[in-house]
Amino acid sequence: MSLISIGMPLYNAEKHIRQSLDSLLRQTHTDFEIIISDNKSTDDTFGIIQEYAERDSRIKIFQQSENIGPIPNFQFVLQQARGDYFMWRSYDDWSDDNYLEMLGQLLDGDRSIDLAAADIVKVKEGAEKPVELNIDRAARSNSFSRSLHMLKTSHPGWMYGLFRRQVALDAINDVFENFPHVWGWDHLILFPTVSRNRVGASDRTRFFQRETGISHSRYRPKLPKEQVRLATDFYRVCWRRYRNSDASTMAKCAMAFYLLRYTSSKTEKFTRILRIALKLRKP
């Protein structure tokens, strides 16, 4: 297996960063680099990662001179990567010790996939809850019905799976250029691979995703005008990517309609936008 690059975009991560780094340094696959970009934290994040970098030469750290925002920071760590395979890791998530090994083996053994994902366990206030995704791990096809199934079962935690580096780079560059929002951008990173059935899954390792609610409170739009703009931009990016893919003409026509439902489920439910709008109109 070739070098794996791990990108960690950080901001005020002192509470959980040690657990996340310790999880990576315990991996059974040891040929990796960890690229950390501190987005001008105001706590002791930079001091902690300096401590780890002094102990392990596989850790490379950068400190932004100003806060460049979350998506540019995610893009930055990927741009520094040298490995054929790449994954993002959040400061408050962790994984089983065989995570890199199992997902790397998936990509090594199957050129028809561009992203390897694992079983997901959501963690909230210390309680663990496995995510039931019902993925058929044995039979992948290129049928349109399979595309719909994959889109319905996709989980934002897949973004922290293992990508072929160029696929991840193409996806985040497209999002950076065409999607001026933070809420929902993880689904856009996944859309090109999920919609074309190029995701493989392993039930031999697990990814633990901590739910803090920070993104919900910080990035989710509150006003109907903002929600409509978000949904419109989300649909536009998805449709352009799928329209330019090698899908059949029939599949593209069907996807143009299905994306309305997909957009509603991954950004803001259209019925919720309408309810908020009507409530604001009341005297």
Image (spheres, helix red, strand yellow):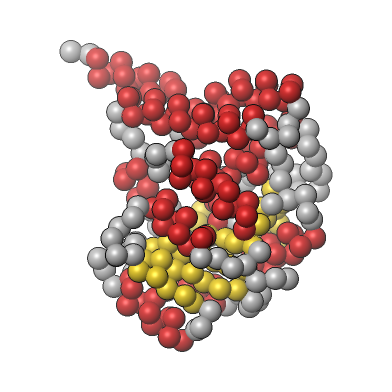
Depicted 192 relative to depicted 126: above or below = above
Most foreground residue, 209 or 148 = 148
Left/right of residue 74 with respect to residue 148 in the rendered view:
left
Task: Write down the quadrant of residue 4 in the picture.
Answer: bottom right
Identity of the residue drawn at 42% across and 50% down: 71
Q: In the picture, which quadrant includes the N terminus?
A: bottom right
- List x then y, in percent, for residue 228: 39, 25
Q: In which quarter of the image is the C terminus?
A: top left
In the foreground, 141 or 279:
141
Tell me, yes or no, if residue 185 can be seen here: no
Name which residue lies at 68% across and 21% down. 254
The location of residue 94, given as percent across then percent down, is: 51, 65
Instruction: Give the x, y percent position of residue 85.
Output: 64, 62
Q: Residue at x 58, y 29 (%)?
A: 239
Q: In this view, does 102 lie to the left or right of 92?
A: right
Residue name at image x 42 percent, y 73 percent: 61
How many numbered marks are there? 0
Q: Quadrant of residue 47?
A: bottom left
Q: Residue furthest left?
A: 283
Quadrant in which residue 25 is drawn: bottom right
Can residue 2 be seen at all in this image of the molecule?
yes
Residue with the most extreme bottom position: 55
In the rendering, at what x and y percent does residue 271 appear? Answer: 43, 21
